[in-house]
Image (tube, rainbow, N blue to C red):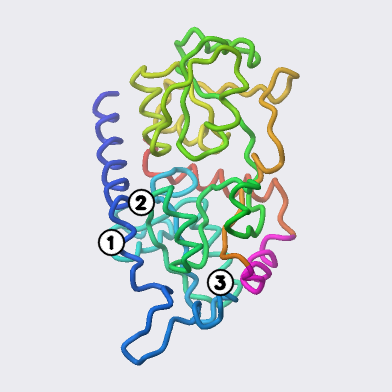
């Protein structure tokens, strides 16, 4: 287990390291600055209306399996990360590829830290973020959303040998130490619903959140079902606590569970192009694709 744990840490560290410097890889992309020929980028010329340069530039962490991750080669259809030696894959990459193919665009993946994703869309350095982001009203103040491209049920995740492993509802989690990823509804809105919770500082990333649980810093984390299912592949000693069949469950609105694709405000052409691909898909379609992503994530034994 320890060998596997250190291997997991090494892979995640590589991905997170690249994410930390990822913002530099998009300096020349769709910034609106003049090119050597004196022209601005197509996104800037169009005021953010569509993908007129034919390149669908998508940002993600590439460190958030099974939504997205970084791997050393192009196995299973992975896409090269802009300015890096690694390749991105996962549910978000699969979705981005389908959208790009349907619209005749070339796909380009940019790796950024979580807190840099929305600002990159606002600045026009990328066309969209496909990164497992909830379609919250707060985010919609600064970006528009296409989708949803997934409906993500909220769950808790604990160690299988934890005193909380038998929890049947939120009341059974009272008094436990909890955390989640920074800048998410999991941390800001859902953890506070647990009575007498000992809310710990947020984790900078999903891998860091899972490591806090694995190393005993917290008793449980709050996340969504896809993230929890992916975590079990890397950490089989964890257990998912799903309270959705009972009354004592997290109170989550549509904006908490609807996962969308962030695009620049007013970019209706791009929004329409994305939604044309997603509009006829069902929750079952999304879940089947997520199952495919989970099966190929690199943390699997």
Which residue in the protein does label 2 denote? 70
Q: Nearer the viewer, mark 3 or mark 1?
A: 1
| Pointers 2 and 1 in contact (C-beta within 8 Å) | yes
Q: Considering only order in the chain, which callout, 1 or 2, is on the residue closer to the N terminus? A: 2
Q: Is residue 253 left or right of residue 201?
A: right
Instruction: Examine the image and state in which quarter residue 161 appears.
Output: top left
Instruction: Examine the image and state in which quarter residue 78 appears.
Output: bottom left
Task: Count residues near mark 2 (Cα–Cα under 10 Å), then give few for <14, some for 14-19, many for 20+.
Answer: many
Q: Position of residue 187 (x, y in %)?
A: 52, 31
Tell me which residue sits at (65%, 74%) in the image.
269
Tell me the magenta residue range: 266-279
User: What is the spatial separation of the Cα atoms under label 2 and label 1, in whole angstroms?
Assistant: 10 Å
Which residue in the protein does label 3 denote? 101
| Pointers 3 and 1 in contact (C-beta within 8 Å) | no
Which residue in the protein does label 1 denote? 84
Q: Position of residue 260 (x, y in %)?
A: 61, 53
């Amino acid at each position: 287990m320890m060998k596997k744990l250190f291997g997991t840490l090494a892979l995640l560290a590589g991905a997170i390291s690249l994410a930390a410097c990822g913002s530099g890889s998009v300096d020349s992309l769709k910034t609106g600055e003049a090119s050597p020929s004196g022209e601005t980028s197509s996104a800037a010329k169009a005021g953010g209306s569509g993908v007129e340069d034919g390149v669908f530039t998508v940002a993600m962490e590439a460190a958030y399996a099974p939504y997205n991750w970084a791997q050393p080669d192009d196995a299973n259809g992975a896409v090269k990360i802009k300015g890096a030696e690694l390749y991105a894959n996962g549910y978000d990459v699969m979705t981005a590829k389908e959208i790009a193919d349907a619209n005749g665009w070339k796909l380009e993946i940019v790796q950024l830290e979580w807190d840099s994703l929305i600002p990159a869309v606002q600045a026009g350095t990328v066309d969209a973020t496909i990164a497992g982001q909830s379609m919250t009203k707060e985010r919609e103040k600064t970006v528009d959303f296409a989708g949803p491209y997934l409906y993500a049920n909220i769950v808790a995740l604990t160690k299988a040998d934890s005193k909380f492993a038998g929890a049947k509802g939120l009341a059974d989690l009272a008094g436990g130490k909890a955390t989640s990823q920074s800048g998410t509804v999991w941390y800001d809105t859902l953890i506070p619903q647990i009575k007498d919770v000992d809310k710990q500082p947020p984790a900078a990333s999903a891998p860091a959140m899972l490591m806090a649980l694995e190393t005993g810093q917290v008793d449980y984390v709050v996340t969504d079902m896809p993230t929890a299912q992916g975590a079990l592949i890397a950490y089989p000693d964890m257990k998912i606590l799903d309270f959705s069949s009972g009354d004592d469950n997290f109170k989550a609105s549509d904006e908490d569970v609807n996962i969308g694709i962030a695009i620049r405000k007013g970019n209706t052409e791009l929004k329409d192009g994305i939604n044309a691909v997603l509009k006829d898909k069902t929750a079952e379609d999304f879940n089947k694709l997520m199952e495919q992503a989970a099966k190929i994530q690199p943390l699997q034994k």
